[in-house]
Image (spheres, grey):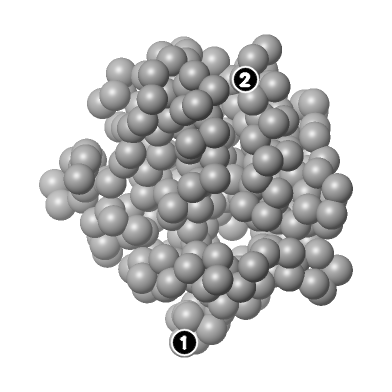
Amino acid sequence: MPLLRVGPDVELYYEDAGTGPPVLLVPGWPLTSESWECQIGALVEAGHRVLTYDRRGFGRSTRAWDGYTPATLVDDLHGLVTHLDLTDVTLVGFSSGAVETARYLATHGPDRVHGLVLASPLSGASALGSDLRAAARWHRVAMLDDVLTRFFSVNGEVALDEATRRHLLSTAAASSARATLTVIDAWSDPTLDLAADVAAAGLPTLVICGEGDAVAPSHRVDAPTVVIPSGPHGVHITHPQQWNQAVLKFLAG
């Protein structure tokens, strides 16, 4: 199992498949690298080296007690990029992962990065944050169940088969309770400015989102945008073929 040590007591689980121009997939809270299942194979078959990882506290990475600040999460991502010596990499971030990728560019610069895909990006401070903190502390699994229903719903109807939704719920629930709670604060930080970070980087950027996204319905980023009809927030999971086609077109230039 590939692990990268990013601190005295923290190791990140990552996956590395394929050859070609690299693409690094960054999952959004509260999901793990398993949420990219429908993207990894398609990107590898299209001739890309595909990498993804579990952020600290989630999935198969160390269940650390501390380090869930924007700065530390971004440094973890930078540690992976430098450890694998990635150059001309396209960063793909889903939801809160989009905020992390943009902050990575603002913190460590765009020298190693070719482009950016913002998948259903949060705009930084999210209205969900204040609603979730108390639930995450006292009713974590029920809260996750509700969140993953909202992630995959359009107009109140769930657009994902229940078996897949329950699988994603089980992986989210298996992550650290401490991480689940404190990462909410990280991506709800009001000082984060996704649009400003993206603009400052000046890289080719694609925004891709679902037409029915009820979690992050407003994407204030000055970049080409693909809107998938009838897609929810987690549109890369509910509509993988359309999502993959749009991203592969962007990667092809």
Q: CA distance from mark 2 to mark 1?
A: 42 Å
Q: Say whether residue 122 is left or right of residue 31.
A: right
Quadrant the N terminus occupies: top left
Task: Say if 48 sits above or below 147 in the image.
Answer: above
Residue closer to the observer: 102 or 190: 102
- Mark with earlier residue (2, 1): 1
Q: Which quadrant of the structure image shows residue 213?
A: bottom right
Task: Say if 32 sits above or below 133 in the image.
Answer: above
Q: Of tags 2 and 1, which is closer to the observer?
A: 2
Residue at image position (26%, 26%) is: 83
x and y, in percent, of residue 200 in the image: 64, 21
x and y, in percent, of residue 126 in the image: 67, 58
Q: Say whether residue 132 is left or right of residue 218.
A: left
Residue at image position (15%, 52%) is: 9
x and y, in percent, of residue 84 in the image: 29, 24
Residue closer to the observer: 162 or 210: 162
Is residue 87 among what the camera can see? yes
Disc 1 element = helix
Residue designated by label 1: 138
Residue designated by label 2: 251
Disc 2 element = helix
Residue closer to the observer: 66 or 121: 121
Residue at image position (37%, 50%) is: 55
Quadrant the C terminus occupies: top right
